[in-house]
Image (cartoon, rainbow, N blue to C red):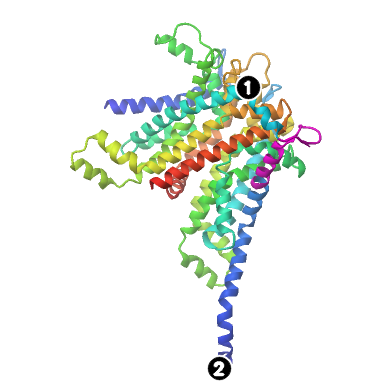
Amino acid sequence: MSRKISAAALAVLFLFPLLWSAWASVRTPTGFGLENYRRLFTSDNGIRVEHVVNSLTVCALTVGGTLLVATLGGYAFGRFTFPGKNALFLLTLAILMVPYATILIALYVLLEWIGLQDSLIGLSLVLIMFQLPFSIFMMRNAFEAIPKELEESALIDGCTSFGALTRIMLHAVRPGLITVGLFAFLTSWSEFFAPLILLNSTSKFTVMLAVVNMRTASFGAIDYAALEAGVTFMAVPCLLLFLVLQRSYVQGFMSGALRG
Amino acid sequence: MTLLAPARPTVLPSTPPRRKRNKQWIGALYAAPTAFVVGMFFVVPLGLVVWMSLHHWPLLGAPTINAPENYAGLADDELLRSAVWFTLKYTVVVTVLLFVLSFGLALMVQHRRRGVGLLRTAFFLPAAVGFASASLLFLGLLSDEIGPVNRILESVGLLDGYVSWTSGSANTALGSAVVLVLWRFAGFNMLILLTGLQAIPLDVYEAARLDGATRFQIFRRITVPLMRPTIALVLTLMITGSLLAFDQFWILTRGGPDNSTTSLVMVIYREAFIELDLGSAAAISVALLGVLIVFNAIQLGVLRRRS
């Protein structure tokens, strides 16, 4: 019994900050209301419509790009042999060992050379790269798990390998695609460090950068209540999406971790 | 049929290799986008950061070679030295506390019982929130203006008067960041440890219990040894993540008070975009990268020898 109580107390402790943030975001000096959100969207350092558009663009490009590259790559690694296959696979996993901060300085220079500095496309390409180790690993396992006969029957029916992929295999790897897509969305929506380095002009900022900017660019007092409104605005889509897709997310995560 | 028969012997041996080569070529084609992204945005920058570290590379203007000046300069960088010590201290504190908490949570929700699903969700939910958002959340939570923490601690008598958690002193600033990281990452690590726990067959426990092993003995002699690969994975993630800490200090403590919570990656950022010296920033990055590679190699070596 005491174990149950302490477990429940811990759960409350973990949920408390999230609930408090939502509560603080609607709390005003006179009661409750959306005043903090109004300041969040209208103050000089706050969120503007273009920031939301920027964030949605980066999310769409990152999720779409990651799904495309990881599906084709996972198919290649799971179903084909080709020269350099193992080397490329290990190189992709090595991205995990060489995280963010150490190569972003070089990426900043590189993107300038290819004309993608301060660009949402450049940022998305970098985010896709950082998603690849996990996504390729997931999708390779998903394609390997499909019975060979399924693909062969499609090939005998006259499908090309691409036809077999789009008509039959894609359906079979759907749980993997959901996990990979969800991961890509959560990262690209909330990512802070990469956009901080790769985006310079305020008009290109993502929502996350804009919200943090309310804290770091304010010389006087910080508007904490508006800040919590920003936190809630950022967190709600992630929490909802996670709760809806929780089952496949955890399953995909566990199968990936077990194989690793 | 009879017409085709003579042609067969010549066709049959030649078809499989060609089809195989064809299939290889198609496989390589599917892997091409991966190869492009990995090559262009990982391998090239990796080489470039080494190349940059050998140059005087201003943010604006032409780079000139100056090796090994960037590396030599690291030795007498006072801020860098204190950041290295601080980052190591932070890494030890976070890794120990986070590991104990995550393992405890994983053991708590190990068996399917009523309510365990809800507990798992509650512990994991903070991980769905972005880390920068979580840092801002704690900035408000710990603030005196709107945060409830001071008031709650005062009302239960644990606190006497006003404490500025995130900027009052070096210790409270570090403590704030540690609590934030524990809250945000415990559930995620719990989930990884849980996969390891559930991979242990139940009859192993059963046999030990029949032999009269106590709970603690089972944990020490069975759970921990069988979990070794998972534990190694979790520790690697924790240590690497802590060595690269940035968001929590940039947002929560701003590196203060008096640079006491300035982490290594903050120094890299500062060199590059405040001092506008990309060469030095690259040199610190390369040094950090070297440490991480050595660390990971040792980790892999230990793992392989054990298994």
Residue B27: percent from left, percent from top: 59, 62
Q: Is residue A30 magenta?
A: no
Q: Position of residue B76 (x, y in %)?
A: 65, 23
Instruction: Say above or below: B1 vs A243.
Output: below
Above or below A25: residue B1: below
In the rendered image of this protein, does residue B134 appear above or below residue B204?
A: above
Task: Please report the bounds of the magenta region as a residue range.
Answer: B42-67
* Left or right: residue B296 compared with residue A112: left
**What kind of residue is marked 1?**
Leu
> Could you say which quadrant of the image residue B101 lies in?
top left
Residues B181 and A45: in front is B181
Q: Residue furthest bottom?
A: B2
Q: Is residue A25 visible?
A: yes
Quadrant of the frame with the N terminus of chain B: bottom right
Q: Residue at x 52, y 50 (%)?
A: A137
Nearest to viewer (mark 1 / mark 2): 1
Residue A133, how many percent across, how many down?
55, 47
Q: Which mark is residue B2?
A: 2
Is residue A152 shown left or right of residue B40? left
Front-most of A36 and B201? B201
**Tag of residue B79:** 1
Chain containing mark 2: B
Within 10 angstroms of label 2, few (less than 14), some, or many (20 or more) residues? few
Question: Where is residue A117 shown, x and y percent of the image?
Answer: 74, 39
Please state which of residues B57 and A71 is positioned toward the viewer in this rendering. Answer: B57
Element class at badge 1: helix
Q: Is residue B115 visible?
A: no
Who's the residue at 57% across and 26% down the image? B84
Please determine if labels 1 and 2 lie on a single subunit.
yes
Badge 2 marks a residue whose secondary structure is loop
